[in-house]
Amino acid sequence: MNNRPVLFIDSGIGGLTYLNDFTARNPREEVCYTADCKNFPYGPREKEEISSILISLTEKLLKLADPKIIVLACNTATISALEPLRKNFPDLPFVGTVPAVKPAAGASITGKVGILGTARTIEDPYSQHIAENCETRAGSQSEIFGIAAPELVEFIEQSFDKADKNEKKEIVKKYIDLFRAEGVDTLVLGCTHFLYLLEEFRKEAEPVIRVFDSLGGVTKRIEFLLDENGRKLRVEENFKPAHQLFLTEKDSSDSLWKNRAEKLGLKLSFV
């Protein structure tokens, strides 16, 4: 048994969608969430810079939270830093979040797969490599059509809490129209922030375009690691979790984060 927390890291609020999915299925497990506000957003940064940021941050969090598993709840962070982190901290399990390209490509009939993500995620060869090695339902090779949407990341980070239904619908429709014009029939939400608009994307896109995410797959991977070798990382039967939220700097959005922490039952502190 191991009562240490499962730690989720993102540059902002995007990874909270993964934390929420995990805690809904594993309510007895303690969790910590780190929002790296100091370095938000990760998308425009070079891979080496993101790796350096996350290695330094992980060193601090190991002392502060002593996690048993770290989840990189950010596609950009995963693509850029997962392997360097595993190399630097070989005794600590890491779980990444990567765009769900494989199931999207496998479900495509037209062979055209859309990815909506950050610039770093879109430019990385990972997604194209997966697509090229995955047959579509029609038996052909899939083709990636990517759109970088940094303004959508900003919208969700700063404006989602107070945006109305029409605002959310309109900002989603703009991207769906672009993908539809390219003949895309499957769409991957390749940034954790975009999952806040998952239902809006599905309503606007389906049934012509099927929308894919990696929420369930990530939670299953964490659970696998927790249950490995006879539930060696699971908590004790009577353990009462105390969830935490860490921010990497104090800024003008503190009040917004305080409200989010209260809604989610997270104790707020700073790294």
Image: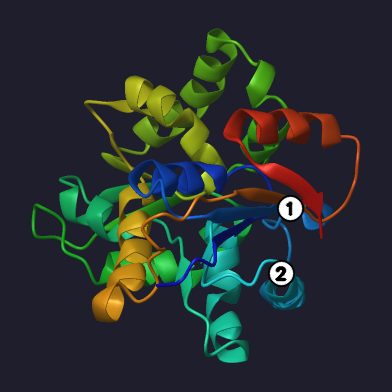
Give x and y (percent) for residue 28: 42, 50
Give x and y (percent) for residue 158: 73, 31
Callout 2 secondary element: helix
Q: Along the horizontal axis of the image, is 80 left or right of 259? A: left
Q: Earlier in the sequence, mark 1 or mark 2?
A: 2
Name the amino acid type tagged 1: Phe
Q: Which residue is mark 1?
A: 246
Give x and y (percent) for residue 69: 50, 70
Could you tell me which residue is drawn at 47 percent across and 38 percent down?
A: 195
Q: Which residue is mark 2?
A: 61
Callout 1 secondary element: strand
Q: Which mark is residue 170?
A: none
Q: Is residue 118 above or below residue 87?
A: above
Could you tell me which residue is drawn at 53 percent across and 56 percent down?
A: 73
Report the quarter where the N terminus lies. Answer: bottom left
Residue 147 in view: no
Residue 222 in view: yes
**Label 1 neighbour load within 10 Å: few <14, some 14-19, many 20+:** many
Determine whether label 1 and label 2 are within 8 Å by CB: yes
